[in-house]
Amino acid sequence: MREYMIFVDKVRRYSENQPLEAAIEQTVDECIQEDVLRDFLLTHKAEVKKLRKV
């Protein structure tokens, strides 16, 4: 649950300064690098990037 909250917080912060799609893409890439939800994101990266509501 902690890692999910980190992901959501990053998306919210990044989406304040850029379009949501870009914020999600930046968050996914950053979380993979930081080992936050890494396995899940590597497996479901394309589906996560299609998200519109956070």
Image (cartoon, grey):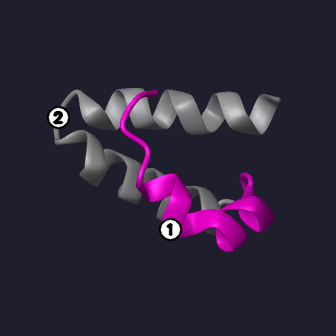
Residue 18 higher or lower than 2, as above or below: below
Magenta stretch: residue 45 in it? yes
On residue 17, the disc is: 2
Left or right of 34? Residue 24 is: left
Q: Quadrant of residue 16?
A: top left
The answer to whether any part of residue 35 appears in the image is: no
Q: Main secondary structure of the magenta part?
A: helix
What is the crowding at mark 1: few (fewer than 14 residues within 10 Å), some, or many (at least 20)? few
User: Quadrant where the N terminus lies?
Assistant: top right
Return the residue found at the far bottom. Answer: 42
Q: In this rendering, which labeled residue sits more in front, label 2 or label 1?
A: 1
CA gap, disc 2 to disc 1? 22 Å
Q: Residue at x 60, y 56 (%)?
A: 31
Residue under the image location 43 percent in, 57 percent down: 49
- In which image quadrant can residue 8 be found? top right
Q: Residues within 10 Å of mark 2 (few under 14, many from 20)?
A: few
> Where is residue 32 shown, x and y percent of the image?
63, 65
Q: Is 8 within the magenta?
A: no
Secondary element at tag 1: helix
Q: Amino acid at mark 1?
A: Ala
> Residue at 38% across / 58% down in the picture?
25
Q: Earlier in the sequence, mark 2 or mark 1?
A: 2
Q: Which mark is residue 46?
A: 1
Q: Give left or right: position of 7 versus 29.
A: right
**Amino acid on which the number 2 mark rests in the picture:** Asn
The quarter holding residue 26 reads bottom left
Is 44 situated above or below 15? below
Q: Is residue 1 left or right of residue 27?
A: right
Q: Start and end of the magenta stretch?
A: 35-54
